[in-house]
Image (cartoon, rainbow, N blue to C red):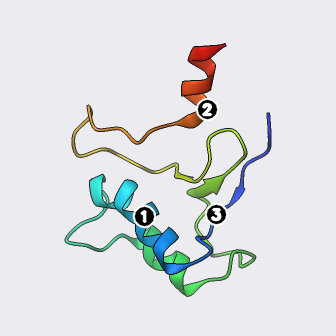
Amino acid sequence: MSEATAYRPSCGSEGADFMARWCGRCTRDIEGYCRISADTMVFRVTDFEYPVEWRTDSVHGPRCTAFDAIDPMDQPFDPGAAIGLLL
């Protein structure tokens, strides 16, 4: 299994996709504001203050480990879990 590293979208459209997939469906995103997503725009990935919640690896891809779905049945797609079902 690969080690998870800090995730930062490489461009605006990738960031918008990530935020729609995670932030837009999370209870922590109150009225369009989440401290985690805000801090990813303020700090560098190498800064101590960069949120540890935004992670990526080769198995599961980018994700927010603090995600708390507004609708428990509306979970983001997890490529690692899907591959596990096929094995």
Picture coordinates of residue 36, whole percent (x, y): 46, 68
Task: Say if 48 sits above or below 78 in the image.
Answer: below
Binning the other alpha carbons within 10 Å of mark 1 as few (below 14), some (14 to 19) or many (20 upward) gives few
Residue drawn 62% across the image and 41% down it: 60
Say which element carries label 2.
helix
Give the amino acid type for the residue marked by disc 1 in the picture.
Answer: Asp
The mark that comes first in sequence, 1 or 3, is 3
Are dots 1 and 2 in contact, CB under 8 Å? no
Which label number is shown at residue 80?
2
Residue 72 in which image quadrant: top left
Query: How far apart, in angstroms, are the residues tagged by discs 2 and 3?
Result: 17 Å
Residue 56 percent coordinates (x, y): 66, 53
> Which comes before the other along the chain, label 2 or label 3?
3
List the residue tagged with mark 3. Answer: 7
Query: Which residue is labeled 1 in the image?
Result: 17
Q: Quadrant of residue 82?
A: top right
Q: Amino acid at mark 3?
A: Tyr
Pick whichever of labels 1 and 2 is earlier in the sequence.
1
User: Which residue appears at 29% of the width and 64% of the height?
Assistant: 29
The three-letter amino acid code for the residue at tag 2 is: Gly
In front: mark 2 or mark 3? 2
Q: Which of the pair 78/6 is nearer the observer?
A: 78
Quadrant placement of the C terminus: top right
Q: Residue furthest bottom?
A: 42
Measuring 67% from the left and 82% from the top, which residue is drawn there? Answer: 44
Asked if 21 appears above or below 87 in the picture, the reply is below
